[in-house]
Amino acid sequence: VQLQAFGGGLVQAGGSLRLSCAASGFTFSGYTMGWFRQAPGKEREFVAVINWWREGTGYADSVKGRFTISRDNSKSTVYLQMNMLKPEDTAVYYCAKVSQTWQGATTRSGDYDYWGRGTQVTVSS
């Protein structure tokens, strides 16, 4: 299993970024996928999740209305569109897959078994 996240960078507050996570080594369409982030000195936190059947999504309150998670099962890729970015969104962003096939959306990091290497997002004020 490999998860490769990319698309991070430096952006001014109010700007946008689109993260992508390319997956391989498993049947992507059968797994719920999530995005998490970790800021310096803080614990990793849930950001967004999308069900394997693409109809169910969930967001942390801090990003609701600004971030959108989506997936393209034909490309084995999950995306995170981030708009109206704030300095407090600065973190390393990780994509992850849940451990069980056909599992529904979950915000618990313990339900995820594989994690990408992360991509840095820095939002300047």
Image (spheres, grey):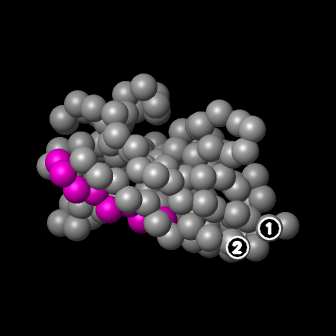
Q: For numbered disc 1, what is the local secondary structure?
A: strand
Q: Position of residue 36 (x, y in %)?
A: 52, 44
Residue at the image point whose x is 75% and y is 52% from the top: 88
Residue picked out by circle 2? 11
Q: Badge 2 local density, few (<14 within 10 Å), some, or many (20+)?
A: some
- Percent across and percent down for residue 32 are 30, 42
Task: Report x, y in % for residue 99.
Answer: 27, 32
Mark earlier in primary sequence (2, 1)? 2
Marks 2 and 1 sit apart, C-alpha to C-alpha, by 6 Å
Magenta: main secondary structure: strand
Q: Is residue 9 magenta?
A: no
Query: In the rendered image, is residue 99 in sight?
Result: yes
In the rendered image, the vertical position of residue 18 relative to residue 29, given as above or below: below
> Which amino acid is tagged 1?
Ser
Residue on which the image places disc 1? 124
The residue carrying pointer 1 sits among few (fewer than 14), some (14 to 19) or many (20 or more) residues within 10 Å by Cα, namely: some
Percent coordinates x, y for residue 67 in the rendering: 55, 58
In this rendering, would 29 be left or right of 72? left
Q: Left or right of 93: which side holds 87?
A: right
Query: Which mark, residue 57?
Result: none
Q: Residue at x 60, y 52 (%)?
A: 92
Residue drawn at x 46%, y 43% as measured from the top left: 58
As drawn, 93 above or below 115: below
What's the residue type where badge 2 is placed?
Answer: Val
Most foreground residue, 52 or 97 = 97
Contact between labelled residues 1 and 2, with CB atoms less than 8 Å apart: yes
Question: At numbered mark 2, what does the secondary structure look like: helix, strand or loop?
Answer: strand
Which of the pair 24/48 is nearer the observer?
24
Q: Please determine whether, in this image, residue 19 is positioned above or below residue 23.
A: below
Left or right of 20, for residue 22: left
Span shown in magenta: 18-26
